[in-house]
Amino acid sequence: MVLIAALFFVLNLFPSVDIVAAEKLKMQPRQTFQVSKITATLNQYKLSGTDKKAFLEENLTLDNIEKSCKIVAYFIGAIWVYFNYFKGRTYRPRVETKLAGNLVLKNTLNFVKLDLQIKNVGLAKVDISQKGTALRLLVYKSTDAESLWEQYLTVAILEEHQWIEPGEIIEEQVLLPLECDTIAVRAEVIVVSTKTMWETAAILV
């Protein structure tokens, strides 16, 4: 469907010389105009039978070349649109995610404050799948260098957005409580679309 529409667009890029000539001269389309022109030329120069035949063959050859060039141009345009739309990355979904934040210490209470930014840097609308799109927190509680990050909390994000328009920027702020013995936090933002997923992470200490 898209390829047909693209081909129609390409055809419009090459307006018919026949119709343009007919409009400018306020005459019938090219076929009538060309026959009249050839006839007038033959009468004007009073060409012989052999010359008339050569003249007609030359005009028909030029006309066929012109039509062939148009057909080739149409196919080249269609191929260009196909490779840019289907094979190229022009209309592939592209999302840029940014994550920043800091730990907030208030007496015996600890919080993590996060600023999220999701931007559609592509040329196509990006659908957001709520299933899988989330903010995930991992915490580090030990001074032992060999300790691993522990899964702490996962919260939903972008719940009010079903898609992102090209060039659109979505920003959200999140404030979450932490346990008192938390030393560091690893925050991960995951944005899931139809067939693609984007992820970014930041470590806060």
Image (spheres, helix red, strand yellow):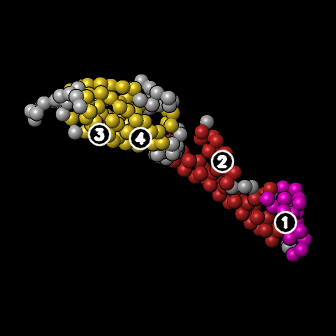
- Residue for point 50% across, 31% down: 161
Q: Specify the amino acid type for callout 2.
A: Phe
Q: Rounded to the nearest whole Å, what is the CA distance between mark 3 and mark 4? A: 15 Å
- Residue for point 89% across, 74% down: 44
Task: Indicate the quadrant where residue 41 lies.
Answer: bottom right
Badge nearest the viewer, 1 or 2? 2
Residues 198 and 19: in front is 198
Residue 77 image point, x, y percent:
59, 51
Of labels 1 and 4, earlier in sequence is 1
> Is-magenta flag for residue 41?
yes
Badge nearest the viewer, 1 or 4? 4
Q: Specify the amino acid type for callout 3.
A: Asn
Residue identifier under label 3:
102
Q: Are the two marked residues, 1 and 2, in contact with CB atoms closer than 8 angstroms?
A: no
Residue identifier under label 2:
9
Q: Quadrant of the N terminus?
A: top right
State left or right for residue 63 relative to residue 142: right
| Disc number for residue 38 | 1
Whether residue 86 is situated above or below residue 37 in the rendered picture: above
Q: Rounded to the nearest whole Å, what is the CA distance between mark 1 and mark 4? A: 69 Å
Q: Specify the amino acid type for callout 4.
A: Gln
Q: Residue furthest bottom?
A: 45
Q: Are the two marked residues, 3 and 2, in contact with CB atoms closer than 8 angstroms?
A: no
Residue identifier under label 4:
117
